[in-house]
Amino acid sequence: MGLLNIPDELVELRSSLRQFIDREVRPIEDAHRQEIQETGTFETIKDENLKLRKRSAEVGFYGIHMPEEVGGGGLSLLGQVLLHEEAAATGLVLAQIESIFPVISGPTPIYMDCTEPQREKYLYPLMSADKTTCFALTEPGAGSDATRIQTKAEPRGDGRWVVNGRKHFITAGDYADFALVFAVTDGEKRAQGGITAFFVDADAPGYSVTRIQRTMSPYQNPVELSFENVEVSAEQVLGKEGFGFYSAVRGINGARLQIAARALGVAKHLLHKSMEYANSRVAFGQPIGKNQFVQGMLVDSHAELEQARLLVYKLAADIDDGADGRQQAALAKLVATEMVGRVADRAIQVHGGNGFMTELGLEAWYRDVRAMRLYEGTTEILKTNIAKTLGL
Ligand SMILES: Cc1cc2nc3c(=O)[nH]c(=O)nc-3n(C[C@H](O)[C@H](O)[C@H](O)COP(=O)(O)OP(=O)(O)OC[C@H]3O[C@@H](n4cnc5c(N)ncnc54)[C@H](O)[C@@H]3O)c2cc1C
């Protein structure tokens, strides 16, 4: 594929996503517009999200990133990037994460390690958006260095396991039907064959959501989960015992590219808003966009967005063409998420005091995009990963 030639079928797919959003998502969000403007989000967002997710599954977008053998669309990474960017660029809260597209609350490639009975019980209900999951790895004492997790699963002797421990920062943990929980099963081996991934049902005795963790972002409130003598069966082990990390990394490139794509989309939305404002807001007898200082902010944002977009598209296409992906996905996420932070900051500045007020909805994005540099690999961890691939 030539670098700048996006295949026609992907362009068409992107416009059908746009139509779906305009037809089914936008009217719902518009109905809540007043409330969003006053509060930054709206009370019934979770219910509306769940309904739209279901619609997205029905029309084929929700599981489009999953392989065809499990009912997905088998979409390339470049295709996924185009769709995630398009959704985020609408600036609609309901077109963002864990809504019409799942990032970690729905089906991800990790689930390709499921056995057939596990597919029936866990994966297919995720594909149809009838169920929600969460990915429970991080703990208070182990974030970037996930090999230090303390949650333990001990064999009971009859093939069953007993899980004890505490996880935090778990997205969608408050409404997940089951969690994918990473626990130490061999304290000596740890990351080398001693950490296992278990499906744990939310209604299992001893499973509890101990608190909701409020964040800078109005759209993200992960939770703390605790497991007190939670029993799980051998059928609830995902993949090979002791090799949970191997399943976890299956989805990481896709997730990093999706986040990079969202960063492109949000930046596009914020730049568009900033351009409109620069052309319409008058100060000193002319639109503020006639001032070179304001132009400089807009041109910098435009230039950085264009650079990041080209890079992210190229890196996604490189992985589709067979590149190993470790460097590509890390680089895409690093560049795009750092870029959107700068674009969001300038968007507030261009809008002056109005940018700081909740009414315009800009400051909510400013706060929301901050998290992109933390999850799925912090900026520093991405740099460390890239350095390794460079032979450092
Ligand atoms: C909104 C949000 C949602 C999340 N959702 C989930 C979820 O659903 N499931 C889940 O399991 N986790 C989730 N996380 C956790 C996320 O993956 C961790 O926050 C992330 O891995 C970083 O870990 P930490 O916060 O413990 O920071 P730490 O690892 O303690 O890092 C602190 C600082 O030290 C730096 N640092 C650490 N090690 C190195 C190093 N070797 N070299 C250079 N710098 C280093 C980091 O970059 C960072 O700046 C979420 C986090 C957030 C913010």
Image (tube, rainbow, N blue to C red):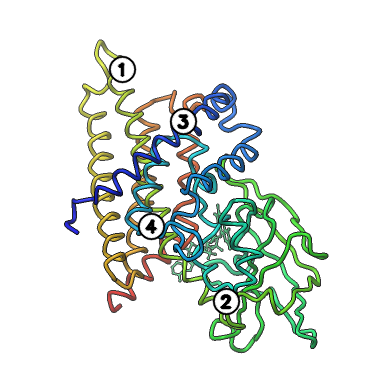
Q: Which residue is mark 1?
A: 280
Q: Amino acid at mark 2?
A: Gly
Closer to the chain start, of discs 2 and 4, is 4
Q: Which of the labelled discs sits on residue 75, or is there none?
A: 4
Pointer 2: what residue? 244
Mark 1 residue element: helix
> Which residue is nearer to you in this view: 249 or 70?
70
Lower sequence index among marks 4 and 1: 4
Where residue 143 appears, as percent x and y from the top left, is 56, 66
| Label 3 vs 2, first from the N-terminus | 3
Q: Answer yes or no: do the residues labelled 2 and 4 have beta carbons within 8 Å? A: no
**Compared to 184, does 62 lie above or below?**
above
Q: Secondary structure at mark 2?
A: helix
| Up-down relation of residue 117 to residue 310 (above or below) | below
In depth, the one of 240 and 275 nearer the eye is 240
Residue beneath the point at 45% across and 45% down: 369
Describe residue 138's horizontal placement relative to residue 67 as left or right. right
Mark 4 and mark 1: span between their CA atoms?
Answer: 40 Å
Dots 4, 1 in contact, CB < 8 A: no
Q: Looking at mark 1, is its residue's CB closer than 8 Å to ligand 1?
A: no
Q: Is residue 331 above or below residue 48?
A: below
| Residue tagged 3 | 23
Q: Classify mark 2: residues with Cα within 10 Å, few (<14), some (14-19) or many (20+).
A: many
Amino acid type assigned to the residue bearing label 4 in the image = Leu
Q: Amino acid at mark 1?
A: Ser
Q: Earlier in the sequence, mark 3 or mark 1?
A: 3
Numbered disc total:
4
Q: Position of residue 237 (x, y in %)?
A: 65, 76
